[in-house]
Amino acid sequence: MFVKIYRISDKGSPFPQHFNFMTKKICYRNFMDVFGAQNTIVIADNCSQETISWIKEYYVELIETNLGNSGSLKFAFQYARDNLSENDGIYFVEDDFLHLEQSELYLREGLTIGDYVSLYDHLDKYMIPSQNPYVKDGGEDTKVLLTRFGHWKYTNSTVQTFYTKVKTLIEDWNELHLFNFKSNIPDSFNTFIELGKKDRKIVTPIPGRATACDNFPSPLINWGEVAKKYMEK
């Protein structure tokens, strides 16, 4: 079974200037359009009733919490462990993402060559200089693979929007908890570096099929055009 756990909050940082057209509602509508509401659990953390009302426009399983960023992520991990089968695929999703069509097919395909799948081709993997210490001269040491959908690469890290098997989540429980919950902001980078030390493979399509709407968007895609469909008329 393919299950999605979508975490959304009214808290958090505003979208950066180059995404000044973006809202959480646009991201949510895009996600529901691409993936559908079936087998979707929405964790609404510190959300207003106005936000809850448009979440409920789709027939999702809604869980309201007041746990903060790290707390709601821990809740999401525990929910998947306690309520899903080990063979289920689980997609953890943050509320500032946009996805392209056929994203589910890419996630499923990615899991045939990796342990964790991110559709986000993080821009800092190509920057000079880069905030990522594993990126040198505009790239990271990697391996490029080809599947029926396109090219993929191994990457050293990603954010908290990723796809894996529940079985893998349980096996990597200690590593996933080592850095993520020391503060209110999960430490994605060090978490995935730690997972890499036990030879877990993180794969990303090139170009990306999704982006975080932050300062490091997946390159080569006009994300404004993707968002336009979901803007208020």
Image (spheres, rainbow, N blue to C red):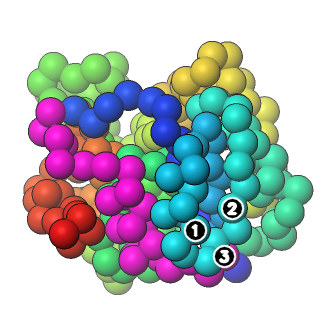
Whether residue 37 is situated above or below residue 110 in the rendered picture: below
The image position of residue 192, as x and y in percent, is 54, 35
Residues in magenta, as a range: 17-39
Q: Position of residue 47 (x, y in %)?
A: 57, 43
Q: Quadrant of residue 190?
A: top right
User: Circles 1 and 2: CB distance less than 8 Å?
Assistant: yes
The span from disc 1 to disc 2 (Cα, nearest Å) is: 8 Å
| Between discs 1 and 2, the one toward the N terminus | 1
Q: Which residue is at 80% across, 53% downward?
A: 79
Q: Nearer the viewer, residue 198 or 75?
A: 75
Which residue is disc 3 drawn over?
39
The residue labelled by disc 2 is 62
The amino acid on which the numbered mark 3 sits, given as a three-letter code, is Asn
As shown in the figure, which amino acid type bears the numbered disc 1? Lys
Which amino acid, mark 2?
Answer: Leu
Residue at left offset 33%, top offset 19% = 133
Residue placed most toward the observer, 151 or 21:
21
Instruction: Give whichever of discs 1 and 3 has the lower sequence position.
Output: 3
- SS class, disc 3: loop
Q: Which residue is mark 1?
A: 56
Mark nearer the viewer, 3 or 2:
2
Can residue 179 be seen from the camera position used here? no
Q: Residue furthest right?
A: 82
For label 2, the SS is strand
Asked if 65 appears above or below 224 in the picture, the reply is: above
